[in-house]
Image (cartoon, rainbow, N blue to C red):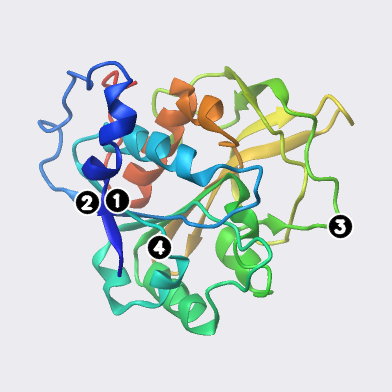
């Protein structure tokens, strides 16, 4: 598996950013959990080479999370996938075949065994050739539906502030794509939603479900650097990894 340590991947990016957070969560829980971000292919409008370091930095702000990046979605086939506590899908099989039956079965088996799964933005379309993907993801991209509102500002409202993944989260504004293209009937718990300016309907922006013994967190936010650099969105995905890993989210200001 061709992995990149988050620290090596972020050297160039972090050089132009503010200094690392000084707040620490090490006193809350000492156990480190391993997070694997799977990226490497997406719709051309989604610049994964630019967004992945931003996502990784936001997650790694919680020092209990050790983040690794792979740019090979086919690594989902590897036996070592089970070594990770959380798998973050940050890819979409645009004009290529998805990682295939072996990767599907492996991902399904690993999550069912009790590992966490987090889906970011267009990862809702990561396995277009796998009809059962919607059961794992909770909802999946349906190309027959309207894709999203025009890129712009909208408000994300928290619909369940008691859920651990919503720890310290409050209503916020973001500049992103408000997805209206998810379909599926799998029972989910919606944690955040936004109202479309096009049709006036509310659409889920973040939701969770159980899959076997595993926890799944799915958010369609994160179109570009601006969207993922929003501190609220960063906290959202950090909370997602903490919760799906079985840790307790903390209220320390890590933005």
Residue 77 in sight here: yes
Upstream in sequence: badge 3 or badge 1: 3
Q: Which mark is residue 214?
A: 4
Image-quadrant location for residue 184:
bottom right
> Would residue 33 appear left or right of 128 to someone viewing this image?
left
Q: Between label 4 and label 3, give the one nearer the viewer.
A: 3
Marks 1,2: beta carbons within 8 A: yes
Upstream in sequence: badge 2 or badge 3: 2
Q: Which residue is mark 2?
A: 33
State the separation of the CA atoms marked 4 and 1: 9 Å
Q: Between label 3 and label 1, give the one nearer the viewer.
A: 3
Q: Position of residue 69 (x, y in %)?
A: 33, 53
Upstream in sequence: badge 1 or badge 2: 2
Q: Which residue is mark 1?
A: 246
State the separation of the CA atoms marked 2 and 3: 38 Å
> Split into 4 quadrants, where in the image is the C terminus?
top left
Q: Between label 2 and label 3, give the one nearer the viewer.
A: 3
Upstream in sequence: badge 4 or badge 2: 2
Marks 4,1: beta carbons within 8 A: no
Q: Position of residue 166 (x, y in %)?
A: 45, 32
Q: Position of residue 120 (x, y in %)?
A: 53, 46
Q: Secondary structure at mark 3?
A: loop
Q: Which residue is mark 3?
A: 144
Residue 112 in sight here: no
Residue at 46% across, 66% down: 73
């Amino acid at each position: 598996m061709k992995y990149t340590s988050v620290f090596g991947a972020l050297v160039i990016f972090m050089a132009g950013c503010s200094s690392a957070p000084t707040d620490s969560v090490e006193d809350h829980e000492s156990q480190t959990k391993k997070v694997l971000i799977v990226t490497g292919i997406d719709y051309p409008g989604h610049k994964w080479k630019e967004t992945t370091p931003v996502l990784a930095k936001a997650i790694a702000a919680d020092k209990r999370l050790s983040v690794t990046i792979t740019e090979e979605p086919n690594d989902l086939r590897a036996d070592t996938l089970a070594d990770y506590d959380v798998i973050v899908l940050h890819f979409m099989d645009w004009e290529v075949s998805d990682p295939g039956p072996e990767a599907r079965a492996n991902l399904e088996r690993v999550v069912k065994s009790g590992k966490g799964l987090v889906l970011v933005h267009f990862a809702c379309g990561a396995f277009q050739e796998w009809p059962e993907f919607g059961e794992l993801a909770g909802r999946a991209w349906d190309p027959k539906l309207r894709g999203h509102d025009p890129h712009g500002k909208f408000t994300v409202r928290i619909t369940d502030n008691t859920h651990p993944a919503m720890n310290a989260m409050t209503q916020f504004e973001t500049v992103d794509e408000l997805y209206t293209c998810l379909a599926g009937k799998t029972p989910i718990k919606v944690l955040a939603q936004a109202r479309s300016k096009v049709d006036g309907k509310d659409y889920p922006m973040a939701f969770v479900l159980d899959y076997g013994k595993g926890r799944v967190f799915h958010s369609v936010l994160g179109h570009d650097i601006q969207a993922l650099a929003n501190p609220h969105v960063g906290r959202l995905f950090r909370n997602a990894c903490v919760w799906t890993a079985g840790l307790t989210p903390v209220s320390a200001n890590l933005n």
